[in-house]
Image (cartoon, grey):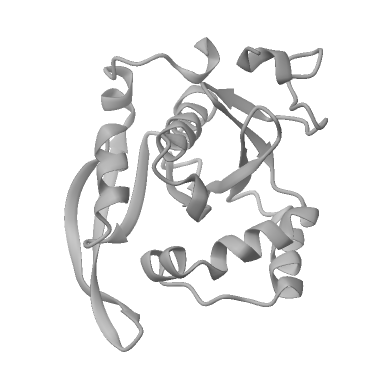
Amino acid sequence: MTEDSTLTGDGHGTADGRRLSWRAGPIGLAALDPDDAEFLHDLRSDPVNAHHLGIWPRARTSVRERIERDLDDDDRDDFLVLLPDGTPVGHVALTGQNLVDGTAEVELMLAARHRGHGHGRAALDAVVDLAFGELPMYRLTAETHTDNAPALAVLATSGFTQEGVLRAACLHRGRRLDVAVCALLRPEWETLARPRAWDA
């Protein structure tokens, strides 16, 4: 069975009927919906995600309320990362969008069992292509702890440059952690030798 055989007839959805906002390679991005609160809650409760993002797990109801609130927020776009069969593997977002300056921040979380399969890189590339190919962004940033080697490797592979370190910027489990600041500029994205999301 080929990957495309699991898409709906119009090529813009998954086998389970979920409408895709964006597709790139092996994954699709679907707008986050309040019904995704349980999956997002599980992602946020994962110890690895909680550590590297410096977040507290929230109650499912508060996650749902946050999704509902953010639906009307013009400064962010949240997506569920889906496999062609509709299986959710993570969450990716463009936050803090400033259309005047052309800046935004990228956030990415993957479910534990889906790490190490290239889905993070595919999701990151997809949202980067969305930011530069459909939106007037000029600069994207991403932050993670300096000890998050897998995330830093994915960011570097996708063209991001580590610009600096925010020393002791995050308190997590009683420890002060350094945060790496990475960025990708539109001219750098334009020179990347990889297919764009719309070529997939």
Instruction: Reply above or below: 154 against 129.
Output: below
* Residue 85, image quadrant: top right
Side of 20 relative to 107 (left or right): right
Image x and y of residue 185, in percent: 30, 33
Instruction: Return the residue nearer the eye: 43 or 185.
Output: 43
Give me the residue at 50% from left, 35% from top: 127
The correct choice, above or below, for 6 with respect to 149 in the image is above
Left or right of 111, for residue 144? left
Quadrant housing residue 117: top left
User: Looking at the image, is 58 positioned above or below residue 143?
Assistant: below
Residue drawn at x 32%, y 49% is 151
Image quarter hosting the N terminus: top right
Residue plotted at (49% across, 36% down): 123
Q: Is residue 169 left or right of residue 60?
A: left
- Residues 30 and 49: in front is 49
Q: Position of residue 80 (x, y in %)?
A: 63, 44
In this figure, what is the number of numbered marks?
0
45 vs 144, nearest the viewer: 45
Residue 149's spot in the image, x, y percent?
24, 53
For image coordinates 45% across by 17% down, the residue present is 196
Q: Where does the image place residue 53, in percent across and percent down from the top left?
A: 41, 65
Q: Is residue 168 left or right of residue 13?
A: left
The residue furthest front is 1
